[in-house]
Structure formats: C-alpha cells, structure tokens
Image (cartoon, rainbow, N blue to C red):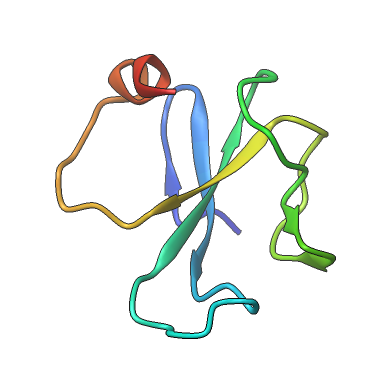
Amino acid sequence: GSLRRAASINAEYMGDLHFQERRVEDWIGVEFKGPHGNTDGSIRGREYFRCKRDHGIFVHEVTKRLCPEDLLDQI
C-alpha cells in the first residue's frame, strides 16, 4: 500500500536498501503516474515495490515538504 498519496505520485516504500553498507538514511520509493522515473520499483535485483518501467524512483528522505508539481520539477 501507499505511504502517501498525492495528485501525481505515490510513495510506495520507505526504508533501507539492501546493498548499502551503512544503513543510516531511509530511502523513499516513489511511483509516478507517468514515465518520470528510472526504475520499476526494483534496484540491483531486489524488488521493493511494483510499478511500470520508468515510473518509479528512489530518493533520500528529506525534511522539506514539496508539492507534487515541485517534486516533478526537481527531477
């Protein structure tokens, strides 16, 4: 299920990535409604969430809140 729903994105995963040596920062797996990403929800052979090809992206957790339009502008 989604962690957060917005007009054009869904946050689908939050946590560590298996290949990180130091697991200090959380990552957020984001699904876009359109092909604005670079993943299908998997990274280095492990699936963290499912979405269409190039509809997902992994980003570091941030404290600044952005509206969906501003997030898309950042990519």
Look at the picture and state if 10 lies above or below 1: above
Is 25 on the left or on the right of 21, as rendered? Answer: left
Look at the picture and state if 70 lies above or below 12: above
User: Which residue appears at 63% of the width and 24% of the height?
Assistant: 33
**Could you say which is closer to the camera, residue 50 or residue 1?**
50
Instruction: Estimate the x, y position of residue 43 in percent, counting from the top left.
Output: 73, 58
Q: How many marks?
A: 0
Residue sitting at the far front: 21
User: Which residue appears at 64% of the width and 79% of the height?
Assistant: 18
Instruction: Estimate the x, y position of residue 8 in percent, counting from the top left.
Output: 50, 23
Residue sitting at the far left: 64
Instruction: Estimate the x, y position of residue 26 in percent, counting from the top left.
Output: 39, 69
**Could you say which is closer to the camera, residue 12 or residue 20?**
20
Is 14 on the left or on the right of 74, as rendered? Answer: right
Q: Quadrant of the C terminus?
A: top left
User: Which residue appears at 70% of the width and 20% of the height?
Assistant: 35
Q: Quadrant of the N terminus?
A: bottom right
Picture quadrant of residue 36: top right
Instruction: Estimate the x, y position of residue 49 in percent, counting from the top left.
Output: 71, 58
User: Which residue appears at 35% of the width and 22% of the height?
Assistant: 74
Look at the picture and state if 64 lies above or below 72: below
